[in-house]
Amino acid sequence: MAARLVVVSVDGLRPEGYLYKSGTLGQLAHEGAWAEALIPIYPSLTMPCHASIVTGTSSAKHGIQANAIFNPNDVHNWKQGESKDFYLQSAHFKAPPIWDLAEQNGYRTCVLHWPTSLGANVSWCLPEVFDPQNPHDYWEPAARHATPELRRLVERHPDFVETRDRYDLDRNLLIAFEIALNRLGADVVMLHIDSLDHDIHDHGRGSPRVLSTYAFIEEMVAAVFERVDLTQTDVLVFGDHGALNFTKRININSLFREQGWLDVQDDKIVSWKAIAHTSCATAPIYVREPALEAEVLDFLHANSAAGYVVLERSMLAGYDAFPEAICAIDSLPGYSMGQGLTCEFITTEKTPRGEHGHIPIYPELDAGLFARGPSFEAPLNLGRFPQTEIFPIMQRLLGLTPARSAKPGVQFTESTSGLFM
């Protein structure tokens, strides 16, 4: 067992970033263990996926059901079709995240920009926190909630930069990573880098901007490895989801308003009988009165030719997602969910953009995973690897028992059994 564990999440990292053995990521991956694909949970959204990674279970069980919280009595504060209240706080977890277990077992843990880590009970934390009213303030909202010692050391570092964009944020997080590992002496460091995902959303996967960002990500990951001793440190690098490109948005709440199920005034929801809580490419559907359920389902099926499929309760139960919803609608390739309340049912983007959140049946949604360090067999192709199995890997690397997978009573699945030295 290695003396230290480093966990790096590159939001939006796809397996083609390393599968072809070229470039920095390819060289790093193929000298260790790597997956042909890391299969995300549903919904394939940043916060639920990261929660599944650190708990080993589904969104319904760990409690992080989407990026934003659905509160049926607070829809008047929504930003059109989505709540402004995000799953930022670690207290939202219904299952213990790996950092809780690590700290309880004596590991000094540092969590950097990890989703749903605000208030995490760890030795050092710089949580992912953002202000929906001021989305371009990249550093200060998180820094205000950081462990004071960590913030002070980062901001006094000679390479600290004014955070004008997400690239600057990632650079400052790398400073925090180095300080946590080599100055504070953390045993476990968990780092989340998200500039790639935001560029995919804004410019579409495969765009020149995203290819340029991949080069930046390679520099970041290489810098992480330069700062660790691989004879004493196990390193996991992975993405949380991939993305599909789209040009059309489905504004289902606009149809609900036309049906009389939403009362909208001044582009705000005043009251509702049926509502879609849109989250990127998917949207769980809720009704106030059970008697309305059949009518809403029939209506959604009748309009599904517009670019979505209806996931009824049985399918949601299979994914263990959105237990309070009557169904969800999930975008087909080329489509995403819109937040419009008074616009056309289908609206068109000027240029392709990237999106995720769908059910994980599309190859474009696959994420990447590779591992290096003294605990791993190398070289080793892991094939297609379930996202929830990262948790028992981390348990085993930390010597935490019993190591468990997403299924109660299961120790290690076939996909993990041959992974370790």
Image: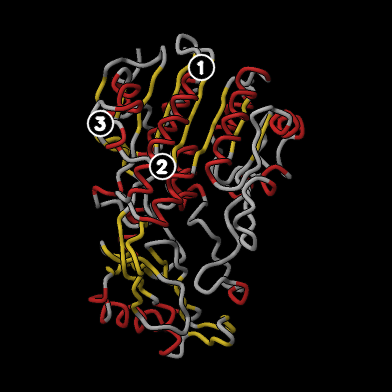
* Mark identifier at residue 228: 1
Q: Quick one: label 3 or label 1, which is nearer the N terminus?
A: 3
Distance of label 2 from label 1 (alpha carbons): 23 Å
Distance of label 2 from label 3 (alpha carbons): 18 Å
Q: Secondary structure at mark 3?
A: loop
Disc 2 crowd, CA 10 A, few/some/many (<14, 14-19, 20+): some
Rendered location of residue 326, percent (x, y):
40, 70
Pick the residue in front: 270 or 299. 270
Pick the residue in front: 17 or 8. 17
Look at mark 2 in the image and give the residue it sits on.
Answer: 213
Q: Amino acid at mark 3?
A: Leu
Horizontal relation, residue 257 to residue 117: left or right: left
Q: Quadrant of residue 414?
A: top left
Look at mark 3 in the image and give the residue it sits on.
Answer: 19
Pick the residue in front: 217 or 8. 217
Residue 36 in sight here = yes
Disc 3 crowd, CA 10 A, few/some/many (<14, 14-19, 20+): many
Residue 407 in sight here = no
Q: Quick one: label 2 or label 3, which is nearer the N terminus?
A: 3
